[in-house]
Image: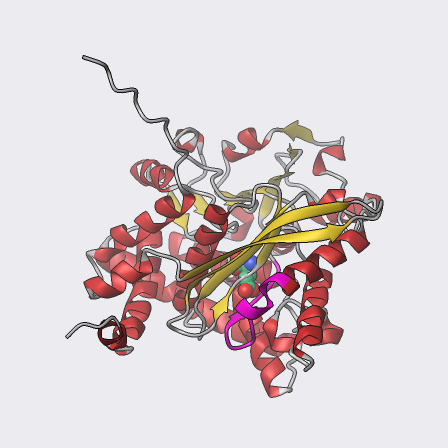
Amino acid sequence: MTAVAPLPKRPPSLLADASTRLDDALQYVDISEDALRRLKYPKASLSVSIPVRLDNGSLAVFQGYRVRYDDTRGPGKGGVRFHPSVTMDEVQSLAFWMTFKCALLNLPFGGAKGGIALNPKQLSRQELERLSRGYIDAIADFIGPDVDILAPDVYTNATIMGWMMDQYTIIKRQASPAVVTGKPLMLGGSQGRDTATATGAFYVIDALLPKLGRQPEQTTVAIQGFGNVGAALAERLAQQGYRVVAVSDSQGGIYAEQGLDIGQIRRHRAARQTLKAGYCTDTVCNLGEHETITNAELLALEVDILIPAALENQITAANAADVQAALIFEVANGPVTSAADRILEERGKLVFPDILVNAGGVTVSYFEWVQNRSGLYWTLAEVNERLQQRLIAEAEQTWAIASQRQVSLRTAAYIHALNRLGEALDAKGTRDYYANGAT
Ligand code: GLU
């Protein structure tokens, strides 16, 4: 008898892991089987090749993606990521999270995401602009202010959003500011969008901590990721009296028991940044006067709050047992895997989910879209007041569902979002059933 060779083990799909969250919430939600089945699959996934003329005259071809996961509650909404690890699976998972994030915050949007696989620090500013415009050329028929709206994500920023909006405007031959959010202020951007994700995370942390009987002054914090969001959040927390003892970036981190001077670290990075296409290439490790730690050490620090604010899949079954922090606030998208979630829950750790904690960004994106369409622009105070109101209301409801149902905060967030989405899907009726030729 010949033995059958085992099939090679495929790497686990990020989307498959992400969608197990639906199964956890399902038993608590009144949603039709049809609605649920639809939510397990992305509605449309586009993969494009983007040719870009490099400064040295040669041609490079980049792989880009745009996924509209679901648009039942409104046009697709989500950022565009520039990162070497971008794949279709990653973009689909990020679009899945956007769908539930927008439903959780009750924004009139579905979920979408885009990305290009590249190391953006290796391109010049001109090359990046050509790539950003080439991406819009390739996906222009797939997006639009009422179809799918773009925004910044990892390694993209307001400048890049401005180029993308401009390219779309050129293609359509009409002003279309609402096709992209997170634009520069002078091109129709919103006050407060640049810091909205950090501001929103701060509002959520500050509103929920008193429920756990904690004061900022007695709370130590470690933050993984010192990009746009991680750095701004670190500074805000430090200003409000929290003791931020550790921060890190992709190169490693620094630790100081008495607390770090976050303002000084940010100024240091800003002063030493060497401009390569507008990115800071300095690292927090260059600050010699503090103890240097690795990213793995940061995740295992004995602190009260751990904030993963970098990429997905950081806390997994392999290191969840090392986490010492009692509270984990997910500022990155998908930093804790479902297997890690179970280990953390067994160990009594509270995980505050990404779709709530980092929803400030897309909420102010929604405000930007509203302002673009009405032509009436708001002050920073108006933006922040509306952001705070919306986020705290949904955070309170998520907390209440978790207490009533005795489930994790993540499951509570999915219950809350699924209730809205399921109702919308069912309200759309049975058109698809008849369209498919059923008698
Ligand atoms: N990229 C951000 C996120 O993951 C913001 C998305 C948006 O503003 O549309 O939530």
Magenta segment includes 202:
no
Expressed as whole percent of the image width and height from the top left, the position of residue 128 reads 74, 53
> In this picture, which residue range is highlighted in magenta?
138-152
Expressed as whole percent of the image width and height from the top left, the position of residue 67 reads 48, 59
In the depicted structure, whether residue 137 falls above or below residue 379: above
Q: What residue is at 68 percent from the left and 68 percent from the top?
A: 183
Q: Quadrant of ligand 1?
A: bottom right
Expressed as whole percent of the image width and height from the top left, the position of residue 394 reads 40, 67
Q: Is residue 330 visible?
A: no
Q: What residue is at 75 percent from the left and 75 percent from the top?
A: 186
Magenta segment includes 144:
yes
The quarter of the picture where residue 14 lies is: top left
User: Along the line of sight, which residue is nearer the eye, 80 or 62?
Assistant: 62
Name of the residue lying farthest toward the top? 1
In the depicted structure, whether residue 381 falls above or below residue 3: below
Q: Quadrant of the N terminus?
A: top left
Q: What residue is at 71 percent from the left and 33 percent from the top?
A: 285
- 163 vs 418, left or right, is right
Q: What number of labels is visible? A: 0
- 276 vs 431, left or right, is right
In the depicted structure, whether residue 50 falls above or below residue 294: below
Name of the residue lying farthest toward the left? 439
Expressed as whole percent of the image width and height from the top left, the position of residue 68 reads 46, 63
Q: Quadrant of the C terminus?
A: bottom left
User: Along the line of sight, which residue is nearer the eye, 36 or 265?
Assistant: 36
Render colour scheme:
secondary structure
Q: Is residue 292 visible?
A: yes
